[in-house]
Amino acid sequence: MSAAVSVAVRDIVPAKEHAGAIAEHFRGYNEEFGRITRRAALNFLAEDWPAAQRDAVARIELYEVWVTRCLASIAEALPAPRDLQRWSEIKDAYEMLVARRPDSDFYRTFFNSVSRDLFATVGVNTQAEFCATNVGRASGAVPIRVYRVGGSLSGAVREIIADLPFGAAIGDHDKAVHQISADIGRYFESGRQSGAPESIELIEPVFYRGLHAFAVGRLIGDSSITPLIIAFTNSAKGVQVDAVMLSRAEVGSLFGYARSYFHVDLPVVSAAITLLRSFMPRKSIDELYTVLGRAKQGKTERYFALQRHLNTSIDSFVHAPGERGLVMIVFTLPSHDLVFKVIRDHFGAPKTSTRADVMERYQFVFQHDRAGRLVDAQEFKRLRLPRARFMPALTEELLREARENCRIEGDDLIIEHCYIERRLRPLNLFLREAEPAAAEAAIIDYGHALRDLAASNVFPGDLLLKNFGVTSHRRVIFYDYDELCLVSDCVFRDLPQPTREEEETSAEPWFHYGPHDVFPEQWLPFLSIPDALRAVFLQHHSELLTAAWWRSHALGEAA
């Protein structure tokens, strides 16, 4: 009896039953995802930041846990789990099973994750996995509340406050109503929108991130839609309004790729994305899925968007603008908004970290509070790209300097492992090119980026301007993670003063220092801040060059 016949005899379970078992694993994952997500409301009211952090990490790790469980189940249930023909039959049955379910693309992405691990797929296997998503098509609705403004904006806002799940915990309702109404009123009186809002639509589930809560919706006026985000914080004084966001730039940043993921219990995520894009039309679908906590779906949408772009463009992959890195080979497609980062086989001096160290730091960023200052890097494995689309010098460098990761296979360049991020303009290049006012704003925001990172217990390690980028909204973001560490792990020291002439004239450090010692007083000459901007930086951020400032933050984190 042939092997194929033997397998057919043993595996008499209908394909739809195997498909159903895979779908059940996704359902189990999705239910646990929902339970963790819903705890965010309790963490917010309890001011339990450690619990919120633990839940954020647990929810991120959950997907791979369920994929692994599903793979183990398949190995037990299928006599020949890598029988491609049988798997294709299961895939067809799976599609029939999930096609009409809300967020059916989530089911397909889960199936693809299982399939790719099962077959160790390089590129895409059209027989074993789904090769498109129902992008732009939502099945289901977003639960919203509509508040008619009529002649009283404050009356509508008062109703909103009363309907919030934490409304009773708001310390001063009148103050909250006045603050929100005044901010909305000023925005419309400024002329940035014509007329006054006729109604307010809010997505019913509240969006949580850390110990912040956000009411998310839009203001509907005469032929106009204005985003509305009301941010709340909680403290010993009770829940208070933290900010009212009405500009598309501000809202876009809140939902951006440098932010940690929201915890929001949406019954149909794709429907919510359709609504969100009504006032963030330039925001990509992959970015919205990701920031709503559906990172795997965001990664899938990003990959398929890249493939669609490759099919409709003709330019070549080139080295990304900026200085060449000692750890990563970074390249981009000029017509697209992504950069690809491949770890070199060996790092040049003075780098002492290893490949494992770099990957660990990227994983840390994936799980940590990014504070709006760390770009979200998505990890891709076994990526297949057309060799003809690479400039020869780039191909040669990848095959020479990253041969453990890159190889040629037929007409394709295979990249075993890389990170894909949104492309930013390196800060050092931006400062050379920008108008004086824009350059001053950027160097000031560079200092604010360091402060924001320190507040989330992150120390960039390498503070050179080339390791920071500027977004389209002129926000400074850090993106080079190979020396990143915790503020609380550093020892910030004042620079010892020489007591003898030979110490003062020594070319080498004459004092003892440990591997975690940091001397902020030494930074300024090495930051390469243009002379015209150095005084601006010192005017706003001179305390960042003192060990005392950093020690105060390190002690705060330790406490």
Image: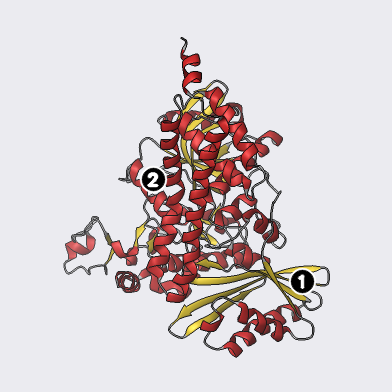
Query: SS of the residue at dot 2?
Result: helix
Q: CA distance from mark 2 to mark 1?
A: 46 Å
In the image, residue 366 sits, relative to residue 311, either above or below, namely: below
Q: Nearer the viewer, residue 439 or 149?
A: 149
Q: Nearer the viewer, residue 528 or 199?
A: 199
112 horizontally vs 204: left or right: left
- Which three-letter amino acid code belongs to the residue tagged 1? Ile
Percent x, y of residue 121: 50, 30
Residue 311 bears which disc, if any? none
Is residue 490 something that shows in the picture? no
Percent x, y of residue 252: 63, 62
Quarter of the view holding residue 221: bottom right
Percent x, y of residue 374: 48, 58
Is residue 72 something that shows in the picture? yes
Q: Earlier in the sequence, mark 2 or mark 1?
A: 1
Residue at which label 1 appears = 220
Query: SS of the residue at dot 1?
Result: strand
